[in-house]
Image (spheres, helix red, strand yellow):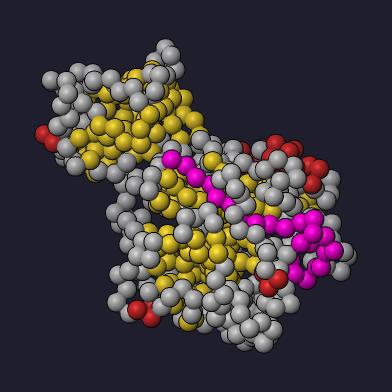
Amino acid sequence: MADRGVDFGNVAGLDVGSRAQLFLDQQAVYSTERIFFRQHAARKHPLNPLVKADQPWEGWRINVYGTVLYDEQEKIFKMWYMGGANAEFPHYATFYATSADGVRWEKPLVGTVKTSKLARHNAVLEFCQIASVTKDLAEPDLSRRYKMIEWSHAGGGRAKPVGGPHVLVSPDGLNWTRLSQENIFRSNDVVTAYYDARLKQYVAFPKLSTPVRGGVRRCFGVTSTDDLLKWPDPRLVFQPDLRDDAGTLRRIGPVRGMLDVPDNPLVMRTEFYGLGVYQAESCVVGFPWIFSINNDARFPLDRIRNHEGPCEIQLAASRDLQTWERPFRTPVIPLGAPGAWDSGFLTTASQAFRHQDKIFLYYGGGNYTHGNPILYDEYQGAERGRKYTSSIGLATWPLDRFVSADGGAEGGLLTTMPLHFTGRRLELNVAAPKGRVTVELLDSAGKPLSGFGKSDPIGTDAIRTTVTWKGKDELSQFAGKAVTLRFELHQAELYSFAFRA
C-alpha cells in the first residue's frame, strides 16, 4: 500500500508533481525564520444543526455515522446517516437524505427496509453502524455502482452475518446487497473507509483495542485493498501518546458541568473514538475523534460499565497512510458553548469532500457526554429525546486552508526542500490583503537561479494566484530538476503552493 503513487522523497529531493503542497504537514519545508504555523478552525454553518431527529422512526438521536457526498451526475447531495435504536428499528438503521444545496435537507420516503410497523420511511439498511459509501462510476456492473463498508450489528438473533465489518453493494444507494458473511478484517465497533483516488485502492480505518501504558484503549489501524473481499491485516497507526494524555484534563475542563462522575486520576486518559478523512492533493487529512475520559460512567449496577467524557475533532496528516503527523492538538471543530446542540460529543462523516472552492465536512453533535446519558439501547433514560439528543451540522473551510505559514510585519522566510515538479507556473493559496509575498527560485544548494531574483510582490487574498517575475510566469525550463523555493512573507498567510500547467 505504501509505495503506490505516494509523495515519497528521494535522494534528489521531494517529488511534488503538480499537486498543491499543504502546510498541515511540513514535508516540503526545509527551514523557517520568523514564521509560525497556525491551524484554522472550521466555520460552522450558521443554520446548524441542519438535520435533526424529527421523525418518530429515527429514535431519540441521529448521527452522521455514515457518509455525505455530492453526486456530480445528479447534481445533488446525498447522506447516509444513523438513527438511535427504537421500536420501529431496534437494531441501528441507516437512513437516507438528500439536498439540493447541502444545507436544506429532505428525507424522501424511499426506505427499502421491510417492516410491518411502517408503510413508508427513509431507512435503507438495518443492523448497520457507520455506512462508508462510495459511488463508483468506473464500475461496469451497474448493480454494484454504490459500495459500502460498514460495521454490522449481529443483533436480532441472526446467525449471519457475523457482527463486524462487512461489504455491501447497491445499484442506487437504496437497495443494498451484502457481499460478505464473515468479517472482512478485524475491528471493534467503529470502522470508517473511503476510496483513495490516488492509490486506486479502498482504505479502511478499523478500531483496534490495544494495550497502551497500562490499559486497553480505543486505537485505530489502517488497511487497504484492490479487492473488497480480500483485505490485509490492519496495521496500528493511531494510538494516544503522552502529549494526548497530558491534554486530557484541559479538554475535560470546559464540559465539567455536563459530566456524570467526578475525575478519577487513575482512569483519566485519551483514546481515539473514530476517524474521518479528506483527500488533499499532497496528503490525506485526518479528522481523529479525540475521546477524553475522566472516569467510569455511573450506570445502574446491572448495566454494562463504560467511560465518561467529551469527544472533539482534531487534525492529522499523512502522505503514506502509515505515518501520521499531528502538530496541533486543539479542536479544528470546536465544541459548542454549554447547552448548545454540539456541546458534548462530536463525530464526523467518513469523508470530507471538495465542493467548488470549499471543503465540506458534516459532523454529528450531541448535547451530552459519553456517559450521560449512556448511549446504548439497553438503557432507557427518561430524558433521552427531551433533554438530550444529537443532530448533524456542517463545517467548512476555504479550499485547503487548514493550516497557514504566517509571517508578521517584520517579515519571515520559509525555504522548501529541493523539489521536483511538473507544470509551467507557480500558484499560491495566500491571504495577504495588507501585506506581501515574494518568491525566489534557488538551486538544491540554496543558491539563486540565474535570471530569477525576487518575484513580483503578491498582495491579495486568493485561493489561487500565479507568481510572476517581471510579469512572466514561465518555469517549464526547470520542470524535472531540483528547485528550491524561498518565500518571504510580510503580514501574510501562505496556505499552499503548487506548480500548475
User: Which residue occupies the foreground of this view, 22 or 352?
Assistant: 352
Q: Position of residue 111 (x, y in %)?
A: 56, 77
Q: Position of residue 198 (x, y in %)?
A: 32, 56
Region rendered in magenta: 376-398
**What residue is drawn where x is 17% and y is 37%?**
424
171 drawn magenta: no
Can I make out residue 418 in this image? no
Left or right: where 1 falls relative to 133: left
Residue 82, image quadrant: bottom right
User: Which residue occupies the foreground of this view, 40 or 183?
Assistant: 40
**What residue is drawn where x is 68% and y is 73%?**
57
* Magenta stretch secondary structure, dominant: loop
Q: Position of residue 449 (x, y in %)?
A: 16, 23
Left or right: where 316 falls relative to 469: right
Left or right: where 336 falls relative to 281: right
* Residue furthest left as drawn: 477
Quadrant, the C terminus = top left
Please say if 117 is above or below 92.
below
